[in-house]
Image (cartoon, rainbow, N blue to C red):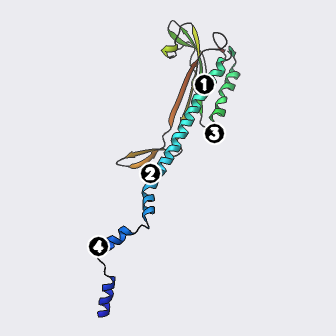
Amino acid sequence: MAAIHSIFEKLKFNTKDLLSRFSDDCKGVAALEFALIAPIMIMLFVGTLEVSAAVSVNRKVSRISSVVGDLVTQSDKLTGSDIVNIMNVSSDIMEPYSNAVKIRITGINIAGGTATVSWSCNQGWSSLSNGSLYTVPTAIKTDGTFLVAARVQTLYQPMVGWARYSESAGVSFDSTSVTMDEEIFLRPRTGDSVAVTC
């Protein structure tokens, strides 16, 4: 019986000693800190990738609009095949992204304070009828002038998703696509207008 009592005495420890030893032991601190910080760092990393990719696609949409409009305004007469070739530039500009791009190039006459469609060529969009009204910014809506409008649109699909937080669901990722749209208005470079047969 004395032997058993002596074993219990050796194994016995009090709570104060246990807490003292636990607070002095630093072996698992780094692992614990990493476990707490890792999810936040991963979310920041993924968020940075998503935002930078979305900004890159948005810049490419703006570039396509600018290039397409600029190429059209450099001529006074273009055929349907010329317009198709100009629109096909979009796939090269979008590299390395494979987003489907919708393009609309519209010739606009402005007279009597009204902007109307002279012609409209489209890729992935429904056609605008000749003579229909077109919305033009007031700052460039000058009577007796001709404008070329180049509008480009694409859907950006996030790679992982947009991180969202709600009290009920916690952190979740939303993979809803984002519409990116750009329109530019340019005046003809050679002559008063651009004639296009779509």
Q: Earlier in the sequence, mark 2 or mark 3?
A: 2
Three-letter code for the amino acid on which mark 3 is drawn: Pro
Query: Is there CB contact under 8 Å for labels 2 and 1?
Result: no
Q: Earlier in the sequence, mark 3 or mark 4?
A: 4
Three-letter code for the amino acid on which mark 4 is drawn: Lys
Q: Earlier in the sequence, mark 1 or mark 4?
A: 4
Instruction: Kindly identify the residue that appears in the image at 42 percent across and 66 percent down.
Output: 26
Task: Work out whether 15 lies above or below 5.
Answer: above
Three-letter code for the amino acid on which mark 2 is drawn: Ile
Which residue bears the numbered disc 3? 96
Instruction: Kindly identify the residue that appears in the image at 50 percent across and 36 percent down.
Output: 178
Residue 140: x and y in percent read: 52, 14
Which residue bears the numbered disc 1? 66
Q: Left or right: where does residue 133 sit relative to residue 192? A: left
Task: Work out whether 185 lies above or below 168.
Answer: above
Instruction: Kindly identify the residue that appears in the image at 56 percent across and 6 percent down.
Output: 144
Instruction: Kindly identify the residue that appears in the image at 33 percent across and 73 percent down.
Output: 18
User: Distance between the Cα atoms at labels 1 and 4?
Assistant: 74 Å
Query: Is there CB contact under 8 Å for labels 2 and 3?
Result: no
The numbered mark at residue 16 is: 4
173 or 138: nearer the eye?
138
User: Distance between the Cα atoms at labels 3 and 4?
Assistant: 63 Å
Which quadrant, please, contains the N terminus? bottom left
Q: Earlier in the sequence, mark 2 or mark 1?
A: 2
Residue 164 in sight from this viewpoint? yes
Mark 2 residue crowding within 10 angstroms, few (<14) / some (14–19) / many (20+)? few
80 or 170: nearer the eye?
170
Mark 1 residue crowding within 10 angstroms, few (<14) / some (14–19) / many (20+)? many
Task: Work out whether 100 lies above or below 1.
Answer: above
- Quarter of the image for residue 190 reads top right
